Image (cartoon, rainbow, N blue to C red):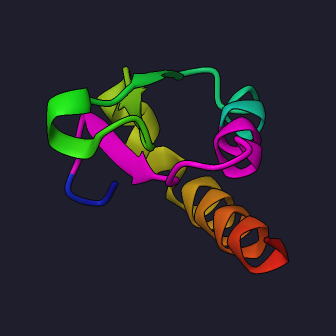
Amino acid sequence: ITNEYDKVTFIHGVGNGVLKNAIIEELKNYENTSNRMASIIKFGVGAIDVMIRDKNWKSENLRNWKLFLGFLSFQVLKL
C-alpha cells in the first residue's frame, strides 16, 4: 500500500471459504476496492485479487489498511 500497488493478492487457501468470505465481507467497508478470483494458473483456486482504484485514497487510508490486515490475521488465527 505504501508502495502504491494497484492490486494485492491474498492467498486464502482451499477449504470451506471462511477466510475468503471474511475478506470479501470486510472489503465492503472500503469503497475504492473491488475483488476477483486471482489467476488460477498462478495460484489455483485459493486466492483473491483486491484491486485498489484510487492511488490518492491508498496513501490517505494506510491506517485503515493496517487495520484490515490485522483483521485478516485475526480471522486466520480463529481458524
**Residue occupying the far bottom of the picture:** 77
**Rendered location of residue 43, percent (x, y):** 26, 44
Q: Is residue 60 left or right of residue 45?
A: right
Which residue is found at the position 15% from the left and 32% from the top? 41
Residue 42 counted in the magenta span: no
The residue drawn where x is 16% and y is 40% is: 42
Of the pair 42 and 7, the residue shown nearer to us: 42
Q: Residue at horizontal 36%, vertical 33%?
A: 56
Q: Image quadrant of residue 46?
A: top left
The residue that appears at 75% across and 80% down in the rendered structure is: 77
> Residue 8 at x, y = what percent?
33, 44
Location of residue 17 with respect to 75 vertically, above or below: above
Q: Which residues are magenta?
A: 4-23
Residue 78 versus residue 24: which sits nearer the camera? 78
Left or right? Give the position of 61 relative to 68.
Answer: left
Residue 39, how many percent across, how many down? 23, 29
Which image quadrant: the C terminus?
bottom right
